[in-house]
Amino acid sequence: MTFRSRFIEAAAITSIRVADFHRYWQGRCVDGKPPSRAAIDPTEIPRLLPYLAITEIEAEPMRIRYRLVGTQAVEATGWDFTNRYLDECGFSVEPMLVECYQRLVATRAPVFAYYEWFKKDWRRPKGAIGANECGFFPLSSDGVRIDMAIDIADPCIPPHSAA
């Protein structure tokens, strides 16, 4: 599989799903602090749930564990990686994902990225070529330490022009 990726600013997001979740997350922040997991109510965002993943962030050494993976994320990757650590998944975009989580923890703010892929042997209905816009949103159980994140990935966007 080959891919290309880059970080993008919130203003560059073209995915309605990623933009909608960004607004929802912002509405759950209190006094500029990231919300807790309990502040996120799935009944308020049912159409976004298939695109979400909830991750647990272990601090020392930093490790990411996927606690819940939505059905669209499973379909886009071809397998359910719920309860797996990122470093066990074998994603070709793993270095980019690690950097997303590092930035998220360091800045306590959302991180946005774009990536495309070409999976030579991929035999899925959507084909072998695809693109994703994604957002990574920090959560804090104590209002201080970032210990979880909610990620949204939209594989239903057209590829960006090569820039």
Image: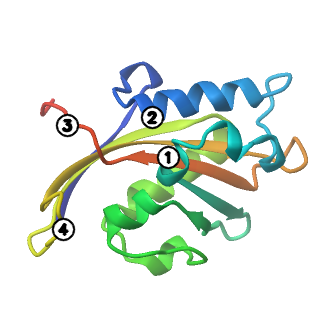
Identify residue type, mark 2: Arg
Question: SS at mark 4?
Answer: loop
The local crowd at label 4, few if under 14, some if 14 to 19, many if 20 or more residues have their Cα within 10 Å, is few
Q: Are discs 2 and 1 less than 8 Å apart at CB?
A: yes
Q: Confirm or deny contact between disc 1 and disc 3 (CB under 8 A).
A: no
User: How far, Cα to Cα, is label 3 from label 4?
Assistant: 17 Å
Return the residue at label 3.
158
Residue 43 lies, in percent from the top left, at 69, 43
Residue under pointer 2: 17
Image coordinates for residue 92, horizontal then vertical, percent:
30, 67
Count up the numbered dots. Answer: 4
The foreground one among 138 and 125 is: 125
Q: Residue furthest left?
A: 120
Q: Nearer the viewer, mark 2 or mark 1?
A: 2
Give the Cα separation between the discs numbered 2 and 1: 8 Å
Using residue 99 as the reference point, say whether residue 162 is left or right of it.
left
Residue at screen point 29% across, 43% down: 156
Q: Amino acid at mark 3?
A: Pro
Mark 3 or mark 4, whichever is nearer to me: 4
Query: What is the number of the mark on residue 124?
Result: 4
